[in-house]
Amino acid sequence: MPPTEVSAKELVFAMKKNVWRAAIEVGFIIFLFYSNLLMGEFERSGIGQKKGVAGAIADVFTAANFGIAMVAAQPVTSYAVNDIPQNLRRDDYDR
């Protein structure tokens, strides 16, 4: 097989690897989003100190917050916010 050709198995493996990476990235961003919201509930003005953990969790896990988390965690959003500026800075240093 010539070096430029890639087998179908290698392509499938590479795609699965990218899908797993994206799923882990999305899950981690959602975890950080919700943990940040939950910590905020126990600040001085947060409702968590008055209603307790159950009240704080009920206040944090809403449909609106889930929508925000899903938009923020999309790999496209992450790529636009993190990777594009990083690549632009890297290109500036290479010149």
Image (tube, rainbow, N blue to C red):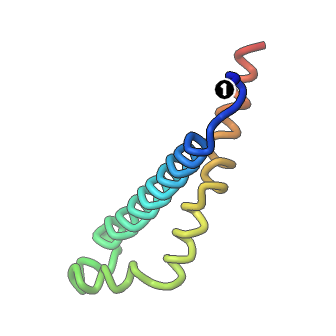
Does residue 64 appear to the left or right of 79 in the view shown? left
Residue 66 lies, in percent from the top left, at 50, 77
Which residue is more in the foreground, 2 or 40? 2
Residue 23 lies, in percent from the top left, at 48, 58
Q: Residues within 10 Å of mark 1 (few under 14, many from 20)?
A: few
Q: Residue furthest right?
A: 95
* Residue visible at 34% across and 75% down in the picture: 46
Residue 36 lies, in percent from the top left, at 38, 62
Q: Amino acid at mark 1?
A: Met
Q: Residue furthest front?
A: 1
The residue to which callout 1 is attached is: 1
Q: If the image is split into quadrants, where does the C terminus sit?
A: top right
Q: If the image is split into quadrants, where does the N terminus sit?
A: top right
* Residue visible at 64% across and 40% down in the picture: 83
Q: How many marks?
A: 1
Question: Quarter-wise, where is residue 52 in the image?
Answer: bottom left
- In the image, residue 25 sits, relative to residue 38, either above or below, namely above
Q: Residue furthest left?
A: 52
- In the image, residue 4 sits, relative to residue 23, either above or below, namely above
Question: Quarter-wise, where is residue 86 in the image?
Answer: top right
* Residue visible at 50% across and 77% down in the picture: 65
Q: Secondary structure beneath disc 1?
A: loop
Residue 2 lies, in percent from the top left, at 70, 23
